[in-house]
Image (cartoon, rainbow, N blue to C red):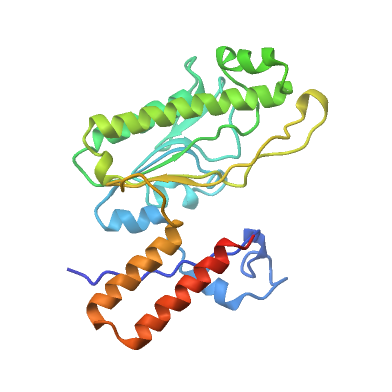
Amino acid sequence: MPARPNIVLILADDMGYGDFGCFNYGTLETRGLDRLALRELTIAELLKRAGYATGLVGKWHNGAYDSRYHPNQRGFDEFAGFSGGWQPYYQWNLDRNGSSSRADGRYLTDVFTEEATEFIHRHRVDPFFLHLAYNAPHFPFEAIEADAAPYKSSGNFTPAVSQIYAMIECMDRGIARVLDTLDRSGLADNTIVMFSSDNGPQFGGKGEMCTDRFNCGFAARRARRPPPGPRHDPFHRLAADASRAGQRRTAARPQARRNQRDARTAGRAWQGAD
């Protein structure tokens, strides 16, 4: 069995891909980052090599003009979605592994949910990686009228925000269906489910098209969920778990105890910072 790889996670804040030297024609020199870019592999390619069935449902935003970046060329066995920046929610055209599929009267978010649940069902006996990339609530602001009506009639929101909240409500129902499918298939305890949004909400516009509202962050559902109750943030928890494992191996060396005290002090300082 191959040795398990080490993992290094490096995070920057508010940096765009155009800030890489290899993407901005040398405006900025980023030799270290360029080394990473030149070794680029998608997570789908890595997991496919490891024996996973890989599927992408939804928005890809790559490969529209260059087939080398089509999902089927980037590690995904199955693709049902689109490669551009946006699609109408009713008059959509989808790419299904290179073949075009036209709108059939269904709302696009519901189409993606169906595709996702069917992928899970097809691969319920295999390890799989499903990237479900809803385009909601991206422009155009087109919602199912029954979902939008309560927000519009409340008088609390602009028409644009009413549409956006209705679009999110439909997506939320879809996510619940995906989770229910995992539960019914007996896969929930062995499936890590993560959710995030790409750049946060779109703000701006005037009058009826004003989209100002609250921001959102990241959420996840862990396989084999821990019991409820107060816990430290996940990164400090991982550090604490690693520290405990090190203690078992090294039997309470003085330096290890000092490192633990330093970590606790740093953790308290972090929790008090912005």
Q: How many marks?
A: 0
Where residue 198 appears, x then y in whole percent?
A: 57, 46
Residue drawn at x 59%, y 32% as measured from the top left: 137
Q: Is residue 141 above or below residue 258?
A: above
Where residue 73 appears, x then y in whole percent?
A: 41, 50
User: Dividing the image into 4 quarters, which one contains the N terminus?
Assistant: bottom left
Q: Nearer the viewer, residue 229 or 44?
A: 229
Question: In this view, which residue lies farthest toward the bottom?
Answer: 254
Q: Is residue 140 left or right of residue 11?
A: right
Q: Is residue 92 above or below residue 245?
A: above
Residue drawn at x 53%, y 25% as measured from the top left: 169
Question: In this view, which residue lies farthest toward the right?
Answer: 206
Residue 101 appears anywhere in the view: no
User: Dividing the image into 4 quarters, which one contains the C terminus?
Assistant: bottom right
Where residue 32 appears, x then y in whole percent?
A: 56, 77
Residue 140 appears anywhere in the view: yes
Residue drawn at x 21%, y 70% as measured from the top left: 2
Give residue 87's quadrant in the image: top right
Q: Nearer the viewer, residue 179 or 240?
A: 240
Q: Is residue 193 left or right of residue 212?
A: left
Where residue 240 appears, x then y in whole percent?
A: 37, 67
Q: Nearer the viewer, residue 211 or 264?
A: 264
Q: Is residue 88 above or below residue 3?
A: above
